[in-house]
Image (cartoon, rainbow, N blue to C red):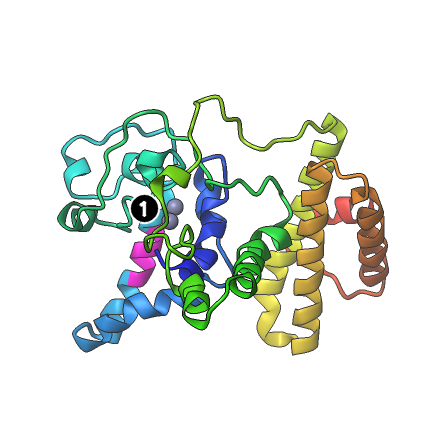
Amino acid sequence: EVNILWAAHQVHHSSEDYNLFTALRQSVLQKYTSWMFNLPMALFIPPSVFAVHLQFNLLYQFWIHTEVINKLGPLEWILNTPSHHRVHHGRNPYCIDKNYGGTLIIWDRIFGTFEAEDEKVVYGLTHPVNSFDPIMLQLRPLTHIWNTFWATPGFCNKLSVIFKGPGWGPGKPRLGLPEEIPVITGKEVPFNPIVPAYLNCYAVVHFAVITDLYTELLATVTTLSQGTVLLRICFIILSLASFGLLMENKSKAGILEIIRCLVFIGVYKLGYFRGQFPFLGYAYEV
Ligand SMILES: [Zn+2]
Ligand SMILES: [Zn+2]
């Protein structure tokens, strides 16, 4: 592991549930770090072949985020299966730094990073974030590196904070000390604060409206000015942050949500928001 790359990838691992939505939970930085793994292929793979396979590779890695499929017989030897990828997402000590393969698991078998699924996998980060706030989830890994960078004395040590493993510290091996990985008791429960049922319904309806706005934005992005696109993206991020705080039952979540709704009503009445799906128009008016 390289700390700065892990900072980009750990957003994907921050989910403490394991389902298809986990596959969609990605860092905004992911695409700025993946290229360095693809670059060597430029030497011997034609760009058109690469472009097609990149999409297949992406699609393949979607469906393996599930607990519904147990084992797939002989395919487990060759392919990265749901079982193998569950291990990759685990925070049990036996799961750490294992099963990196995307489509094929043979690479992990060859390079010694393979681990078969054994005791029940507890998903998520070794130090859980305990938040549904997407801004926090995206930025926390970077602020952690930033703080550790300045708190660590010595220029070489500072570089090590960035380029060695996330568990590294002065005097420790590159990947940190295995005994510092928190022990798993099996009684861990995913972060899931209790919120009233009406709040759950409210969040689902408003999430549908925001998904609609996002779909519309994607469909019309080439016809919009950069300023409009930026404002819409900011509004979508604000909305997701607000829903996250509501689902955490945070006391100040209501204030942020009222501000968000007022912004929405104002901009919608001025005609700047249009939906892709007319049936959601009722929700807009409510
Ligand atoms: Zn994954
Ligand atoms: Zn991963």
Q: Could you tell me residue 99's position as x and y percent? A: 27, 45
- Residue designated by label 1: 97
Q: Tell me, yes or no, whether the highlighted magenta stretch contains residue 255.
A: no
Q: Residue at x 55, y 63 (%)?
A: 146
- Left of 11 or right of it: where is 92? left
Residues rendered magenta in the picture: 54-59
- Image vertical order of residue 135 relative to residue 98, above or below: below
Q: Position of residue 4 (x, y in %)?
A: 44, 62
User: Could you tell me if residue 284 is visible in this image?
Assistant: yes
Quarter of the picture holding the C terminus: top right
At x 37% / y 38%, what residue is drawn?
Answer: 179
Amino acid at dot 1: Asp
Q: How many marks?
A: 1
Q: Residue at x 29, y 44 (%)?
A: 98
| 103 sits left or right of 67 in the view | left
Question: In the rendered image, is residue 51 in sight?
Answer: no
Q: Is residue 74 above or below residue 108?
A: above
Q: Nearer the viewer, residue 218 or 160?
A: 160
Q: In terms of depth relative to the viewer, which is nearer, 175 or 104?
A: 175
Mark 1 neighbour class, 10 Å CA radius: few under 14, some 14 to 19, many 20 or more: some
Q: Nearer the viewer, residue 154 or 280?
A: 154
Q: Secondary structure at mark 1?
A: loop
